[in-house]
Image: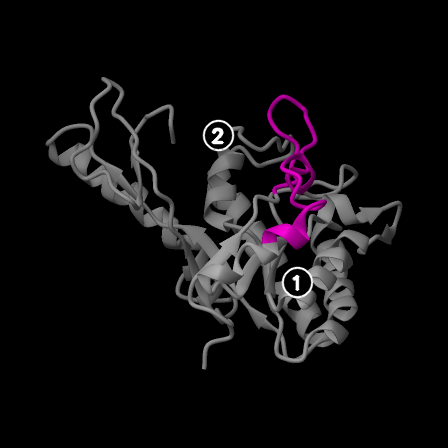
Amino acid sequence: MTPFSSFWQAGYEGADHVNPHGEALAMNHINAHQARCAEDYAALKPFAINTARESVGWRLCERDDSYDFSSVAQRMAMAKQHGIQLSWTICHYGWPSNVSLFDADFIPRFAAFCGALAGFLAPWYDDAPVYSPINEISFLSWGISVGLFALPDIPQEDRADAAKQQLVRATLAACDAIWQADPRARILHCDPLIHIVPEDESEASQQQAESMCETQYQAWDMLSGKRNPELGVIHAIWISWASITTTTINGKTPATAGSIGTWVMHSANR
């Protein structure tokens, strides 16, 4: 049985990270969704969309060693009023300013936050709630490795893999905390589906593109135990499907570009 109320789902941009310019983002406020969530949910009904993904914002809700879930409660109340099921992303690229990914207390702090959130939301749900602890682990790891998300203490050896493993550890600890607070909870692990195009027809270029494509599955493989078998289990996979067309470095559109996000090796659009 599906854990969702509708096949088609809405999503609202809710990232809350600090960008490379040092600007602390709160996209739910910048795009006015937080203030106008009732209107946004009402707009879904003519399309028979009954499920929406929302972002909690760890950085926004943990303040001075306490939690402020008022923004979460506001959206839950409006969603209930309009008959919309909310599926929650807990960490949407951001975390509190006084902790870093590789700090010793990052994982226990994140797990505690997730447990508190699940306990807070449990009374709102008649059916099993759905949580995505960390949004797009593979994309976030890549972004960390290339400086899209600032992280001063990342190991210099295999930066993306180091970040990915730490994010998976945090996700697994979060799952345990969520289930302890609400055993009904279902867990959703999300990542973009991409296709990377070789720059030319050479065997080396094609092998490099294939190898880079395979990295998009690593977080799921870690969570399922296929890679790094000491790690956990997947409940559900969500593939972020984006309508993106990119160009090669010489300005031509790849013939294989389409509605699945298509990346070109070394492209500035990646």
Q: Position of residue 88 (x, y in %)?
A: 62, 60
Tag 1's secondary structure?
helix
Indicate left or right for 269 with 210 as reference: right
Residue 37 included in the magenta stretch of the image: yes
Neighbourhood count class around disc 1 (C-alpha, 10 Å): few under 14, some 14–19, many 20 upward: many
Query: Residue 20 lies in what quarter of the image?
Result: top right
Q: What amino acid is labelled 2 in the image?
A: Val
Residue lying at the far top in this picture: please name it.
250
Measure how far apart labels 2 and 1 are at the Cα level. 37 Å
Q: Main secondary structure of the magenta part?
A: loop
Q: Residue at x 68, y 38 (%)?
A: 26
Residue lying at the far front in this picture: please name it.
46
Neighbourhood count class around disc 2 (C-alpha, 10 Å): few under 14, some 14–19, many 20 upward: few
Q: Position of residue 30 (x, y in %)?
A: 66, 34
Indicate left or right for 213 with 151 as reference: left
Q: What amino acid is labelled 1 in the image?
A: Ala
Residue 241 included in the magenta stretch of the image: no
Q: In the rendered image, which quarter contains the N terminus?
A: bottom left
User: How many numbered circles does the render carry?
Assistant: 2
> Where is mark 2, residue-wise?
146
Q: Which residues are magenta?
A: 15-40
Comparing marks 2 and 1, which lies closer to the viewer?
1
Q: In the rendered image, which quarter contains the C terminus?
A: top left
Tag 2's secondary structure?
loop
> Where is mark 1, residue-wise?
79
- Residue 177 visible in image: yes
Query: Residue 153 lies in what quarter of the image?
Result: top right
Q: Residue at x 57, y 36 (%)?
A: 155
Q: Residue at x 30, y 34 (%)?
A: 245
Q: Eyeballing the image, is 139 above or below 150?
A: below
> Sequence-wise, which precedes: disc 2 or disc 1?
1
Q: Position of residue 243 (x, y in %)?
A: 34, 42
